[in-house]
C-alpha cells in the first residue's frame, strides 16, 4: 500500500463496506448497568454535527429511559459495532434505524423479564423512564437496572417489535440541547491533540515540496546532534521526535534534503482544459426520450459551460493522532471520520492483525469529508512501533493544506432547450470529475440525458495533480450551481419570473413544497431577472433531503465585492429527530457555503500547493454572515433523511443567480471572487 495515495483508502473502504453490516445482536448497541445507566455504542463519531445528541434521542425514544441516563461511546473499534464511517449524512439515515431496532427489542425483552419477575401478564405492564410497572398497581414495579444487572441480554424474541410511529414519539421531534455543548464552550472537551501519555514524544515529519516529488538524499547529522532528539528513517518515513514539540520542530528545520520535483504541467489557469482532455468515457444516467427530438421541439437553446476549482476542507482541528504500543497491541487516539478503515490501514502498515489495533476517536474538530484519510494515524503508529514510545503526530496548518484530499476541480457542460410556451424540452448534461451526486433531474423534461465523466475512484483521482476526495456533499455543490444557473438563464430568456418558471416545469410534490415554503418565508414578489433586486433561487436534493433556498445580495460594482444580506432555506428531511440540531446544520451549511461560493479556491503549480495558511486561503468571516432563516417542512410519512449537507449545495446557485438579478452579470466559475465579478460586469 502506498500510504500517500488517496485512492487506497477509497478502495479499502469499498472492500470493508461490501464485507460488513450492522450486527443483529442488541448487545452490540447498548448496555444497561445495575444503577439504570445506559451506554450506547456506535461506530459513528461526533465532529460537530450533533449526532451524539440525536442518536441518543433515537435510542431513548425506543428504550424508554431518561435522556440524562444515556452515555454515548463513539468510534471505539474495540467497543463499538463496525461502521463504514461518518460521512454522507448517513448517521441518522443508516445507523439510526439499526439503533432504534436494537433499543425497541431490548425494551420488549425487558418487558418479558419484568412480567416473569412481577408475576403479571406482559399486556398489563407499562414502561416509563427505565421503570416497568403494573398499570393497575403502579407500586408493583422493577427497574431496567434490576432486570439487566449490567449483563448481556441473551433472551431472544420470537417476533421483532416495530419502531414507534411519529404519533407516539415523546422525545424524537423535540428540541434537545446538545450534550457536548458545555464541554466544548468551556474547553473541557478532549480532542486527539489533548491526549497526553507518559513519556510521549512529539513527532515532526519531513515533507516533500510538491506532490509527486521523489526524495533523493537526506542529511540528518545536525538533527542527530541535538539533545533529546530521536531520528527515524524507515521505509520512506523520515521524522524527528522530542519530548518538546518546539525542539522537534527545530530538529526538523536542521535536516537537509534533496528532491527530484517533476515539471509542473498544469496550474489554476490550465486545469479545466486538462480535465476535459483527461476525462474518462461517460456513464449515462437518467436517460429519457431522445435528445434530437428535444432539440427539434425547442424554440430557444441555451448552451453553457460551468467550472469549479479545488477547495480545501480546512477544519479547525488539523489531522492529529497519538499512538502507543503495549503488549503487542497498538492503541491510537485519532481525529478521523473512519475509525474502522483506519484500523485496517494501520494494521497493514504495522504488520498486525486488525484485532491488535484499537482506534479510539475523541471529539473531532471538523471533518467535512477531509478526515476520511488517516495518514497521520499511520505515521504515529509506525513511529510508536519504531521508538517504543507513545508518539503524537499533529499536522501544522501547512501540512493540512498540503495533504488535504481537495474537492476536485470540475467542469459541467449543459445544452438545454425550451419551447415557445416556456416548457423545458431538452436537457443534455455532461459533468466532468464532480460525479453524479446532485445531478438528479427534478424538473419535468421529456428529453433528458445526464452524462457523468468520472465518479470517485483511484483511476479518476490520478487525473488530478494531487489527492482529491469527498468534500461536504461531494460534487453536489458543483452540479447544483451549474444546474440552477442554467435554469435561471432559461427563465430570463423566457422573460419569466424565476420562481414561476421553476414551478411551471416541476410536478415533483416534495420539491414544490420546499420551494413554495422558501418563497413564502422570503416574501417573494414576481419579477423578471435581471430586475435590480439582487434575489436568487436554487433547489437541490442531497442525502434523501429536498431543499430550496432564496437569497438577497448587494454587489459593489466598483470593486466586484458581493455582500450576501439574507438567506432563507426550506428543507424536507422526513422525520426530524432534533429540530434545533437540524436548524443548526442548515445554518452551518449556509455559512460554510459562502466560502466555496465567494472566496475558497486552492492555488497550485503542478504538485506544489501555493496556499499554506489562511492568509491566502480565505474562509467566510463573521462579518460576511447574512440573516439566515431555516424552515423545516414537515413530512412524517418519510423516515429521517440526511441533514448534515443538503443546504450547502444551494449556496453557489443562490448567490450566482442573485448576482445576475442585481447586475445582469452571469457567473460561470466558482468561487465568485471580486475580480471575477468585475470581469463579468465588464462584459
Image (tube, rainbow, N blue to C red):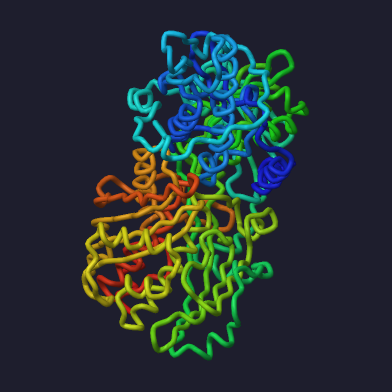
473 lies left or right of 580: right
Residue located 39% across and 79% down the image: 490
94 lies left or right of 262: left
Image location (x, y in percent) of residue 530: 27, 76
Q: How many marks?
A: 0
Residue located 56% across and 36% down the image: 162
Image location (x, y in percent) of residue 286: 60, 69
Image location (x, y in percent) of residue 626: 26, 52
Quadrant of the frame with the N terminus = top right
Q: Quadrant of residue 20 in the image?
A: top right
- Closer-to-camera residue (503/255): 503
Asked if residue 100 shows in the view, the reply is: yes
| Residue 500 in the image: above or below residue 26 | below
Quadrant of the frame with the C terminus = bottom left
Asked if residue 238 shows in the view, the reply is: no
Residue located 61% across and 73% down the image: 287
- Closer-to-camera residue (156/548): 156
Residue located 36% across and 58% down the image: 598
Image location (x, y in percent) of residue 191: 47, 26
Amino acid at each position: 500500500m502506498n500510504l500517500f495515495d488517496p485512492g487506497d483508502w477509497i478502495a479499502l473502504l469499498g472492500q470493508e463496506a461490501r464485507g460488513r453490516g450492522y450486527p443483529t445482536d442488541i448487545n452490540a448497541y447498548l448496555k444497561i448497568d445495575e444503577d439504570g445507566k445506559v451506554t450506547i455504542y456506535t461506530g459513528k463519531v461526533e465532529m460537530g454535527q450533533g449526532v451524539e445528541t440525536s442518536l441518543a434521542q433515537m435510542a431513548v425514544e425506543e428504550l424508554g429511559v431518561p435522556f440524562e441516563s444515556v452515555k454515548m461511546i463513539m468510534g471505539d473499534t474495540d467497543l463499538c459495532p463496525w461502521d463504514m464511517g461518518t460521512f454522507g449524512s448517513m448517521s441518522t439515515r443508516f445507523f439510526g434505524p439499526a439503533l432504534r431496532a436494537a433499543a425497541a427489542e431490548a425494551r420488549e425483552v425487558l418487558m418479558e423479564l419484568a412480567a416473569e419477575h412481577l408475576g403479571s401478564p406482559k399486556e398489563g405492564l407499562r414502561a416509563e423512564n427505565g421503570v416497568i410497572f403494573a398499570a393497575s398497581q403502579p407500586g408493583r414495579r422493577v427497574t431496567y437496572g434490576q432486570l439487566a444487572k449490567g449483563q448481556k441480554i441473551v433472551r431472544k424474541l420470537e417476533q421483532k417489535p416495530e419502531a414507534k410511529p411519529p404519533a407516539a414519539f415523546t422525545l424524537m421531534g423535540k428540541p434537545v440541547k446538545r450534550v457536548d455543548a458545555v464541554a466544548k464552550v468551556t474547553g473541557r472537551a478532549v480532542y486527539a491533540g489533548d491526549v497526553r501519555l507518559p513519556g510521549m514524544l512529539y513527532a515532526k515529519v519531513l515533507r516533500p515540496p510538491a506532490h509527486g516529488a521523489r526524495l533523493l538524499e537526506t542529511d540528518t547529522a545536525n538533527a542527530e546532534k541535538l539533545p533529546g532528539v530521536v531520528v527515524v528513517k524507515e521505509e520512506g518515513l523520515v521524522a524527528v521526535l522530542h519530548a518538546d514539540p518546539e525542539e522537534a520542530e527545530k530538529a526538523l528545520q536542521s535536516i537537509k534534503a534533496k528532491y527530484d520535483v517533476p515539471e509542473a504541467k498544469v496550474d489554476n489557469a490550465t486545469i479545466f482544459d486538462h480535465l476535459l482532455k483527461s476525462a474518462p468515457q461517460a456513464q449515462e444516467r437518467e436517460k429519457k426520450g431522445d435528445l434530437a427530438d428535444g432539440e427539434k421541439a425547442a424554440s430557444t437553446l441555451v448552451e453553457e459551460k460551468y467550472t469549479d476549482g479545488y477547495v480545501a476542507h480546512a477544519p479547525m482541528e488539523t489531522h492529529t493522532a497519538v499512538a502507543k504500543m503495549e503488549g503487542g497491541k497498538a492503541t491510537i487516539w485519532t481525529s478521523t471520520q473512519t475509525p474502522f478503515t483506519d484500523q485496517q490501514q494501520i494494521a497493514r502498515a504495522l504488520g498486525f492483525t486488525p484485532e491488535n489495533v484499537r482506534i479510539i476517536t475523541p471529539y473531532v474538530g471538523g471533518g467535512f469529508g477531509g478526515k476520511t484519510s488517516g495518514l497521520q494515524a499511520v505515521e504515529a503508529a509506525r513511529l510508536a512501533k519504531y521508538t517504543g514510545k507513545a508518539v503524537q503526530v499533529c499536522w501544522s496548518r501547512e501540512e493540512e493544506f498540503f495533504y488535504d484530499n481537495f474537492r476536485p476541480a470540475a467542469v459541467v457542460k449543459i445544452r438545454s432547450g425550451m419551447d415557445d410556451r416556456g416548457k423545458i424540452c431538452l436537457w443534455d448534461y455532461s459533468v466532468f470529475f464532480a460525479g453524479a451526486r446532485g445531478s438528479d433531474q427534478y424538473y419535468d423534461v421529456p428529453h433528458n440525458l445526464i452524462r457523468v465523466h468520472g465518479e470517485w475512484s483511484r483511476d479518476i483521482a490520478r487525473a488530478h495533480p494531487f489527492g482529491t476526495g469527498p468534500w461536504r456533499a461531494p460534487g453536489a455543490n458543483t452540479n447544483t450551481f451549474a444546474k440552477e444557473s442554467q435554469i435561471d438563464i432559461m427563465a430570463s430568456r423566457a422573460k419569466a419570473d424565476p420562481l414561476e418558471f421553476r414551478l411551471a416545469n416541476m410536478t415533483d410534490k416534495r420539491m414544490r413544497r420546499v420551494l413554495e415554503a422558501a418563497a413564502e418565508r422570503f416574501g417573494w414578489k414576481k419579477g423578471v431577472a435581471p430586475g435590480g433586486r439582487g434575489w436568487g433561487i436554487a433547489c437541490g436534493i442531497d442525502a434523501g433531503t429536498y431543499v430550496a433556498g432564496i437569497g438577497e445580495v448587494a454587489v459593489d460594482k466598483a470593486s466586484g465585492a458581493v455582500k450576501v444580506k439574507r438567506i432563507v432555506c426550506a428543507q424536507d428531511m422526513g422525520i426530524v429527530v432534533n429540530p434545533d440540531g437540524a436548524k443548526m446544520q442548515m445554518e452551518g451549511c449556509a455559512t460554510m457555503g459562502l466560502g466555496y461560493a465567494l472566496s475558497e479556491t486552492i492555488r497550485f503549480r503542478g504538485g506544489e500547493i501555493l496556499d499554506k495558511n489562511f492568509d491566502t486561503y480565505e474562509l467566510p468571516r463573521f462579518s460576511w454572515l447574512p440573516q439566515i432563516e431555516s424552515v423545516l417542512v414537515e413530512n412524517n410519512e418519510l423516515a429521517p433523511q440526511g441533514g448534515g449537507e443538503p443546504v450547502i449545495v444551494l449556496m453557489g446557485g443562490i448567490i450566482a443567480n442573485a448576482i445576475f438579478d442585481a447586475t445582469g452579470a452571469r457567473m460561470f466559475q466558482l468561487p465568485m471572487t471580486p475580480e471575477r465579478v468585475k470581469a463579468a460586469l465588464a462584459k
